Image (cartoon, rainbow, N blue to C red):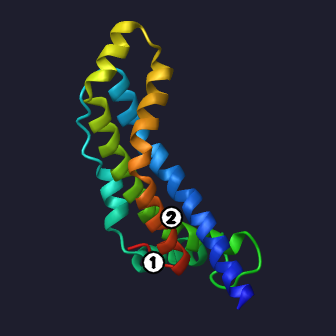
């Protein structure tokens, strides 16, 4: 039982790391647009595409491409890091899309707050504004990150 728990926790760690990386990459444009003072008009199409893909369909597609057509990864087993790539991708991409969507919404609402205009007029650097916006937006996501982490541990995040 401890071996199975170790496998689940290792896979959860890899999938969560990938999800956070995907969410960060998808939210860079929202952060950049908000720091420039413009309203973000992106619809988050990539995030929605990742969210709507069911894990079993994504896993099947990744298995066919990554293990059958391009034999880059092993199709079964759990013996090395290579065995973790396909399951981590199939779990981490949808979770990353959800995190990206939630983070982008939190960033948009934070950029609309009046204190940020005051900071810009006062001459606060964009880096300091970005840190303050992230510190204001991230606490609202912590419960969701906790739920996603628990879901990834069991193999399903929704």
Q: Residue 68, image x and y in percent?
A: 57, 78
> Any mark on residue 26, and which?
none
Q: Is residue 71 visible?
A: no
Distance between the alpha carbons at the discs numbered 1 and 2? 10 Å
Q: Residue at left 26%, top 23%?
A: 114
Earlier residue among tags 1 and 2: 2
- Residue 77, compared with residue 9, is above or below; it is below
- Left/right of residue 33 with respect to residue 91 in the rendered view: left
Q: Residue furthest right?
A: 79
- Left/right of residue 146 with respect to residue 73 in the rendered view: left
Foreground pick, 111 / 22: 111
Foreground pick, 40 / 84: 40
Q: Callout 2: few (<14), some (14-19), or many (20+) C-alpha neighbours within 10 Å?
A: many
Foreground pick, 52 / 116: 116
- Left/right of residue 5 with respect to residue 31 in the rendered view: right
Q: Residue at left 30%, top 45%?
A: 105
- Residue 140, compared with residue 155, is above or below; it is above
Q: Nearer the viewer, mark 1 or mark 2?
A: 1
> Any mark on residue 156, and which?
1
Residues marked 1 and 2 touching at CB (< 8 Å): no
- Residue 62, compared with residue 36, is above or below; it is below
Quarter-wise, where is residue 136 in the image?
top left
Q: Residue at left 71%, top 79%?
A: 6
Q: Residue 32, image x and y in percent?
A: 40, 28
Quarter-wise, where is residue 17 in the image?
bottom right
> Any mark on residue 92, and which?
2
Q: Callout 1: few (<14), some (14-19), or many (20+) C-alpha neighbours within 10 Å?
A: some
Q: Residue 120, image x and y in percent?
A: 36, 13
Foreground pick, 44 / 112: 112
């Amino acid at each position: 039982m401890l071996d199975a728990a170790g496998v689940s926790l290792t896979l959860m760690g890899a999938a969560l790391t990938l999800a956070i990386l995907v969410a960060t990459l998808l939210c860079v444009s929202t952060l950049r647009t908000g720091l420039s003072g413009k309203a973000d008009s992106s619809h988050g199409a990539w995030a929605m595409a990742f969210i709507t893909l069911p894990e079993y369909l994504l896993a099947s597609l990744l298995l066919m491409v990554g293990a059958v057509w391009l034999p880059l990864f092993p199709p079964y087993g759990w013996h090395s890091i290579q065995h973790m790539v396909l399951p981590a991708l199939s779990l981490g991409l949808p979770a990353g899309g959800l995190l990206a969507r939630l983070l982008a919404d939190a960033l948009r609402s934070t950029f609309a707050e009046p204190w940020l205009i005051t900071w810009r007029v006062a001459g606060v650097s964009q880096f300091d504004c970005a840190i303050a916006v992230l510190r204001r937006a991230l606490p609202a996501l912590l419960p969701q990150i906790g739920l996603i982490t628990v879901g990834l541990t069991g193999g399903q995040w929704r």
